Image (tube, rainbow, N blue to C red):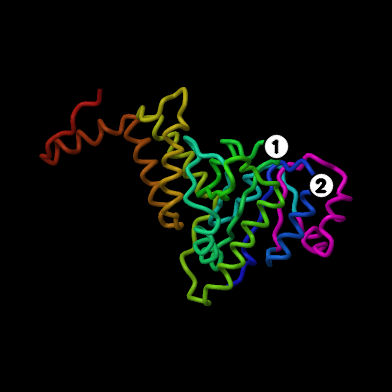
Amino acid sequence: MKLENCRVVLVRPAGAANVGAVARAMKNMGLHQLVLVQPRFRNRFWVRAMAVHAGDVVARMRVVENLADAVADAGLVVGTTSRAGLYRTPLGSARELAPRLVAAAQSNVVALVFGPEDHGLSNEDIKWCHQLLTIPASPEYPSLNLAQAVMVVCYELFLAAQAQPQSELGPRWAPARDVEFLFQRLRDAFLRIGYLHPQNPDHILFAFRRILGRAGLEERDVKILLGLARQIEWYGDGGWRILQEKQREAGVTAAPEKR
C-alpha cells in the first residue's frame, strides 16, 4: 500500500535542525508531504543541512499560519501525545493504529500532527484531531525528540503498508474543515438549549469530538448531523411552540412544556 496521502504536520516547531531531521526521516519511510504551522525560526540553513538527501521533501514543504489550514482537506487527523488526560485519550500506540491509518490513506489524506518540542500539542490543537496516538516509552523519560517521534510513527506506517496487500478503496471521510464547521454548529445548537455550560462549553464538546472521531464521518453523515443541529436551534428559538400546536391539530399528545 502507498503512503503518498500521509502528511506530517509540525505545529510551531522551534528548531530548524529538527525539521531537517524530520524531512530525512520521512523520506526514509516513503512519506513526502511536510507542513509547518507557524515555525519559530527564520533561517532554513539547518533544515536543508539536516535533511541531507531529502531536499525534495524540503522543497515541497508548505508553511501555513494555523493548524486549520494544514489539515483542512484531511479526512483523518491524528494527533500525537505523550500525556493522557481529560481531553487526551489515545486510541492506541503508533503500532496499534498504523494498519488503520494506512488503510484510511488509500482514500483520504491522513494528517499526522506533532506538537512543539518543548510542550507538545495544546488543547486548542487537540480539538482538530479526530484521533490520538501515543508512542510507548520508559516512564523515567517518555518525551521523545521531535524527529525521533516522527521517525517512530513513520516507521510503523511503513511496516504496516508493506504488510497489507493492496485492497479495494475504503470510505472517503469528510474533510476536517467540514467536520469542524459541524462541531461549531453543534456547539451553537447545544448552547441554545442549555446543554453546554456557557462558561466551559468545550468540556462536553470534546467528548463529542472523541466519539465521532473514533467513528469517522462521511459527507452524508456530516449533512445529517448539520440537519440535527439546525433542528435543535429551531426548537431552542421557539420552534417547540409551533411543533406543539401542530401536534394538537393532529390529535397527538402534546410535548411537555419547556421549562
In the image shown, does 183 or 234 lie closer to the viewer?
183
Q: Is residue 70 above or below residue 108?
A: above
Quadrant of the rendered image containing residue 163: bottom right
First along the sequence among labels 2 and 1? 2
Identify the element where label 2 is drawn: helix
Identify the element where label 1 is drawn: loop
Q: Is residue 228 above or below residue 112?
A: above
Name the image quarter holding the C terminus: top left
* Residue 229 spot, x, y in % from top left: 39, 41
Quadrant of the rendered image containing residue 29: bottom right
In the image shown, does 129 or 137 lie closer to the viewer?
137
Which residue in the protein does label 1 denote? 118
| Magenta residue check for 107 | no
Name the image quarter holding the N terminus: bottom right
Q: Residues within 10 Å of mark 2 (few under 14, many from 20)?
A: many
* Residue 115 spot, x, y in % from top left: 65, 43
Q: Is residue 54 left or right of residue 206?
A: right
Q: Amino acid at mark 2?
A: Ala
Q: Amino acid at mark 1?
A: Asp
* Residue 150 spot, x, y in % from top left: 67, 54
The residue lying at 49 percent from left, 76 percent from top is 167
Which residue in the protein does label 2 denote? 16
* Residue 123 spot, x, y in % from top left: 56, 36
Rounded to the nearest angstrom, the CA distance separating label 2 from label 1 is 14 Å
